Structures are given as structure tokens and as C-alpha cells.
Image (cartoon, grey):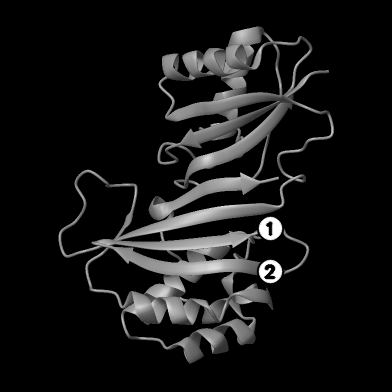
């Protein structure tokens, strides 16, 4: 059976997350419905990451199999036509025919996330739902220094949702950088894989550092406690983007 890889971007605001759910809209279901409308085949697509409700993507990846072989450009154009017709905030940015062994989830070697904080007194007008608005000025240098405590291989139980289904809380965080561009604070995280809510939990904790409530030593103590209760507040989904998946 021909296998296809698609690269996807979406505004996660209208959806209950990536994963198909029986009674709520999802990104996965929107794409599956568009594929069926295009070629008449009911398929199940597999994504590289199960983003939560409200989380966005600029570089999500998924794969699926079809009975019939189609030109990749036709696959992309047809899916997008039906997504647009249905009013979905989802777009396929590329489509490729791939070998049968390719798996969007298990073949991935790294995932890259970006979190955006709008750091100014005035609330967002144009970027509402796309950023986390924090009115109090954040010390991004202190946030970046504290973030380095989390880089490397650790037990991330403190930064793991109680609903996380991963077999182990141990992950290797390759990058956690905090930078500022005007009123926008950018937090970039890269790893082979992440725990449920890990990025948003780390961002919420780093916000405490930026406000002066916590130090890098406090972040280290929270990490070493391996206790969810020691985590800072979980950042909202609005500012989180799955930017790229490496293979």
C-alpha cells in the first residue's frame, strides 16, 4: 500500500487536541475526514506528536496509507481543498510518498517546540490565542540561566502531567533556550521526545524565575524533588507551537 507523509500546520484553538475524540473536534479527525472526502478511503493517520487542546503547530508530521497511488501534489491540494471547505484551521504544507517503514511517530529523532510569551502591559489584540500574555516584565537572562539546570538527562516527574502515559519519566532535554525580541519572549525546547505537559510545565516554572520569585537553585530543587507538587503553574496552551520534527 502506498504510504504518504504530510507536513501540517494548524491553529489549535478550535480543537480538543491532535488526537481523535468521540465528541469533540480534533486535528486528526479533520484531516482524516478530508482524506476520505478526497479519495473515498477511511484511514487512520499517525502524528509525530499528540499536541494538547489549544496547542498550535507549524511543523507537525503525520503518515497514512492508501489503497491507490496518487501524485503527492494532488494529495496535498485535495486534502487542503476539503479542509478549507469544512472551515478547518488546518493546512497541509507538504506531501511526500515514503517507504513503508516510515512512521511519523516512531521514526522521529527529535522534536522542536517554541513557546511565545507576549511580555508587555497591554493585552494582545492581533495575537490573542497565539501567545501567553504576561504583563509583569520578565528577566529573560535569569530565565535562560535557570533553564540550563533542566538541560540533559533527568527524571522529569516534577514537570510531568499526572495523566502522562509514558512508561518512564526520564528524558533527555537537548535544548532549552530563552531569548527576547522586543515584547516577545521566545522559549525553545528540543528533545527526542517529551512527557505530557513537560514544555508547558517548564515554561510556567521559568516564568516564576523571570518574575524574581524563584532562582535557578529553586528550579534545581524542584527538578530533584521528582514531585509534581513542586512544579510552577502550567503555562496555558496558547503560546505553544510544535515547530519541527527531525527524522
* Residue 176 percent location from the top left of the image: 52, 68
Does 226 appear above or below 83? below
Dot 2 surroundings within 10 Å: few (below 14), some, or many (20 or more)? some
Quadrant where the N terminus lies? top right
Does 54 appear above or below 3? below
| Residue 140 found in image quarter | bottom left
Q: Secondary structure at mark 2?
A: strand
Does 176 appear above or below 102? below
Quadrant where the C terminus lies? top right
Q: What is the number of the mark on residue 192?
A: 1
Marks 1/2: CA–CA distance: 7 Å
Horizontal side of residue 207 vs 49, given as left or right: left
Residue drawn at the location 32% of the way across and 66% of the way down: 180
Taking depth in this image into account, of 223 and 150 the one nearest to the observer is 150
| Residue 5 found in image quarter | top right
Dot 1 surroundings within 10 Å: few (below 14), some, or many (20 or more)? some
Q: What is the number of the mark on residue 172?
A: 2
Which one is earlier in the sequence, the residue at label 1 or at label 2?
Answer: 2
* Residue 50 percent location from the top left of the image: 61, 46
Q: Secondary structure at mark 1?
A: loop
* Viewer can see residue 26: no
* Viewer can see residue 144: yes
Marks 1 & 2, CB-CB < 8 Å contact: yes
Amino acid at each position: 500500500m502506498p504510504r504518504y507523509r504530510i507536513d501540517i500546520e494548524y491553529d489549535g484553538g478550535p480543537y480538543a487536541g491532535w488526537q481523535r475524540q468521540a465528541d469533540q473536534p480534533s486535528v486528526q479527525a479533520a484531516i482524516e475526514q478530508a482524506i476520505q472526502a478526497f479519495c473515498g478511503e477511511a484511514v487512520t493517520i499517525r502524528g509525530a506528536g499528540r499536541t494538547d487542546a489549544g496547542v498550535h503547530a507549524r511543523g507537525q508530521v503525520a503518515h497514512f496509507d492508501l489503497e491507490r497511488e496518487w501524485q503527492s501534489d494532488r494529495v496535498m491540494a485535495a486534502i487542503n481543498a476539503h479542509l478549507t471547505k469544512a472551515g478547518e484551521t488546518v493546512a497541509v504544507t507538504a506531501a511526500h510518498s515514503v517507504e513503508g517503514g516510515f512512521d511519523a511517530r516512531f521514526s522521529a529523532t527529535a522534536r522542536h517546540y517554541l513557546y511565545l510569551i507576549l511580555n508587555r502591559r497591554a493585552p494582545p489584540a492581533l495575537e490573542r490565542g497565539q501567545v501567553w500574555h504576561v504583563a509583569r516584565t520578565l528577566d529573560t537572562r535569569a530565565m535562560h540561566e535557570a533553564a540550563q539546570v533542566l538541560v540533559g538527562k533527568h527524571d522529569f516527574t516534577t514537570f510531568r502531567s499526572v495523566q502522562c502515559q509514558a512508561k518512564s519519566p526520564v528524558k533527555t532535554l537537548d535544548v532549552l533556550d530563552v531569548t527576547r525580541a522586543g515584547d516577545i519572549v521566545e522559549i525553545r525546547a528540543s528533545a527526542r521526545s517529551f512527557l505530557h505537559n513537560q514544555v508547558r510545565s517548564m515554561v510556567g516554572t521559568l516564568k516564576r524565575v523571570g518574575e524574581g520569585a524563584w532562582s535557578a537553585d529553586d528550579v534545581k530543587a524542584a527538578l530533584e524533588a521528582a514531585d509534581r507538587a513542586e512544579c510552577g503553574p502550567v503555562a496555558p496552551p496558547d503560546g505553544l507551537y510544535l515547530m519541527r520534527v527531525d527524522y
